[in-house]
Amino acid sequence: MKQRDIIITGIQPWDIEIGSNCKNIAEEFSKNHRVLYVNSPLDRISSIKKRTDFKVQKRLDVINRKSSPFEIIHKNLWVYTPPVIVESMNWLPNFLFRIVNHINNKRLAKSIQMAIEELEFNNYILFTDSDMFRSKHLAQLLTPDAFIYYTRDNLMTVPYWEKHGKTMEPEIVKAANVVVANSPHLAKLAGQHNKHAYYVGQGCDTESFRDSSTTIPEEIRKIKSPIIGYTGLLTTRRLDPDVIEKIATEKPNWNIVLVGPEEDCFKNSSLHQLKNVHFLGAKPPEDLPAYVNAFDVCINPQIVNELTKGNYPRKIDEYLAAGKTTIATYTPTMEVFKNYCYLAHTSDEYVELIEKALKENNETLQKERAQFAASHTWSNNVAEIWKSLERSRLNFSPL
């Protein structure tokens, strides 16, 4: 594959605190291609109300020419902070929203064009991660060789995106040369508006989770087995606290360990009154393998809704990479894992399947899980993205 220039826009800036598919894909692209990762531009309201926030200050410094808009990650990867402010607009009625959004797109495109000229990018590909508003017109304004739209969540279930996204996302999906999705369900949704919509899988940094020699954290050592564990954001938008409560109350000799930040819905839940439910709080990403390796069983008790149906939970790959027995709620996307996970439809099934899993677990199954997870690399994910371009028979230079 010959080297290409790639411009990436999306809804997650480079300095986001949590894991980011788009950043991982950018890193993988940059192994063989030149990549410009464009930070989401600063909006007007944030520039005023959040002026003291560190990230906002960084962007204001760029806008005021106190610092460079470019950050060199390595020789093939640049992060670009656009020295512009876009107007806050989500509160506007649809016809005004569209007018202001087009103005915002023109500001952003003009800024990106300056970066393109600075870096001497040519015949570039535009890759947009879910940014149905700020990137809506970029393909027309920047005229890339190809425009790829990436979908990894059903954002229409989120109020911010739902208001205008129900009409805007189908339009940007239709305009894309290729739509790539990290779950079959999302690919099917996109396929309603673009015949070149493909499931390209998901990447995961599984290697660190495969090291079973990791030192067990001190706060887990004092918790008795069996330990039923979960890592990730604790939110009722994605998780069902009733499932966790059912497991804890049915099996008081089991200990439930929850690792991750809590939203208020969890902070105020009755789970905090149960002696065998342990909230350990948020941990740095590099520490998570140690916690996962301390679990006897891993769970992902998702609540089934339009958001989670198409959600590809990276944590499942992380659990399996560690060889861990995993029980998860059945969703269409979890079909991908059905041969390596126990899939539950009800809270009662969770209890039954955890009991079954504890009895059946063995070294052979652990190796099979780890081997399966190891196939979900960012390299394979990006290879599938390139294949989707070939399958769509685009009219640009062969890769």
Image (cartoon, rainbow, N blue to C red):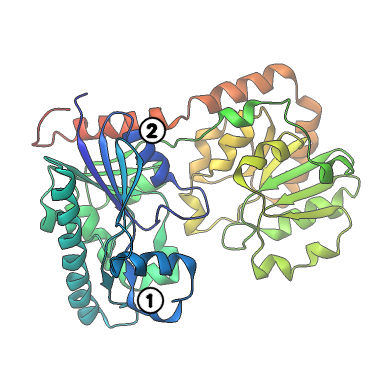
Query: Where 272 falls versus 121 (above or below)?
Result: below
User: CB atoms at circles 1 and 2 under 8 Å apart?
Assistant: no
Q: Callout 1, which amino acid?
A: Ser
Q: Which residue is mark 1?
A: 47
Rendered residue at 78%/44% (across/down): 351
Residue 260 at x, y = what percent?
67, 54
Residue 285 at x, y = what percent?
60, 44
Given residues 364 and 136, the one toward you in this image is 136
Q: Which mark is residue 381?
A: 2
Image quarter in which the N terminus is found: top left
Residue found at the far top of this picture: 364
In terms of image quadrants, where is residue 384? top left
Rendered residue at 38%/67% (across/down): 161
In terms of image quadrants, where is residue 89? bottom left
Rendered residue at 59%/38% (across/down): 316
Q: Residues within 10 Å of mark 1 (few under 14, many from 20)?
A: some
Query: Where 296 falls versus 14 (above or below)?
Result: above
Residue 42 at x, y = what percent?
34, 69
Can see residue 137?
Answer: no
Q: Which mark is residue 398?
A: none
| Of callouts 1 and 2, the N-terminal one | 1
Q: Callout 2, which amino acid?
A: Asn
